[in-house]
Amino acid sequence: MTVDRHALRKWEKVREFALGLPGAAEEFPWGESVAKVNGKVFVFLGVDDGSHPPAVTLKLRDETAHAHALAAPGAEPAGYGLGRSGWVRIPLEEKGAPADDLLCDWVEESYRTIAPRRLISELETR
């Protein structure tokens, strides 16, 4: 499987943004990259080894953002019942996939949903 370079660059930018948020850390449960804050996942990044198409899965509580994310080409509620809680999987290789800046906005929203107040305050003072 060949990986779309543009999608991979987008994935790398989103990963870098997520890990730059206050208190964020990368872990590899299930062999996939996730960004966590305070021990809780705020974005599933999947794998970058070409075995699966690049995608991100994040939690969007804001109804407008959630609907916008689900309207992205190939997007779907996340599996394992996470979709019921607002988690959305967004493939990055699809034609018309969201731009990296918009993905980063959604990552920040997902982070704000999960992060403790003190870290959100730190983010707002940056």
Image (spheres, helix red, strand yellow):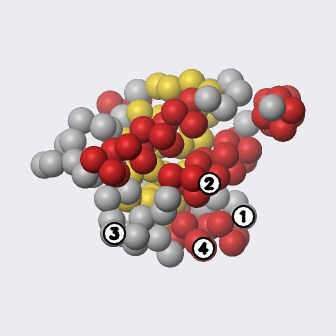
Q: Are marks 1 and 3 in contact (CB under 8 Å)?
A: no
Q: Which mark is residue 95?
A: 3
Secondary structure, mark 3, is loop
For disc 1, the neighbor class at 10 Å (few under 14, some 14 to 19, many from 20) is some
Q: Earlier in the sequence, mark 3 or mark 4?
A: 4
Q: Check the image and report above or below for 28 versus 11.
A: above
The amino acid type, in three-letter code, at marker 1 is Asp
Q: Which residue is mark 4?
A: 67
What distance separates the C-alpha of mark 1 from that of mark 4?
Answer: 9 Å
Q: Quadrant of residue 68?
A: bottom right
Judged by depth in the image, the label closer to the viewer, 3 or 4, is: 3
Q: Earlier in the sequence, mark 1 or mark 4?
A: 1
Nearer to me, 66 or 41: 66
Q: Which residue is mark 2?
A: 106
The amino acid type, in three-letter code, at marker 4 is Ala
Secondary structure, mark 1, is loop
Secondary structure, mark 2, is helix
What distance separates the C-alpha of mark 2 from that of mark 1?
Answer: 10 Å
What distance separates the C-alpha of mark 3 from that of mark 4?
Answer: 18 Å
Judged by depth in the image, the label closer to the viewer, 2 or 4, is: 2
Q: Earlier in the sequence, mark 2 or mark 1?
A: 1
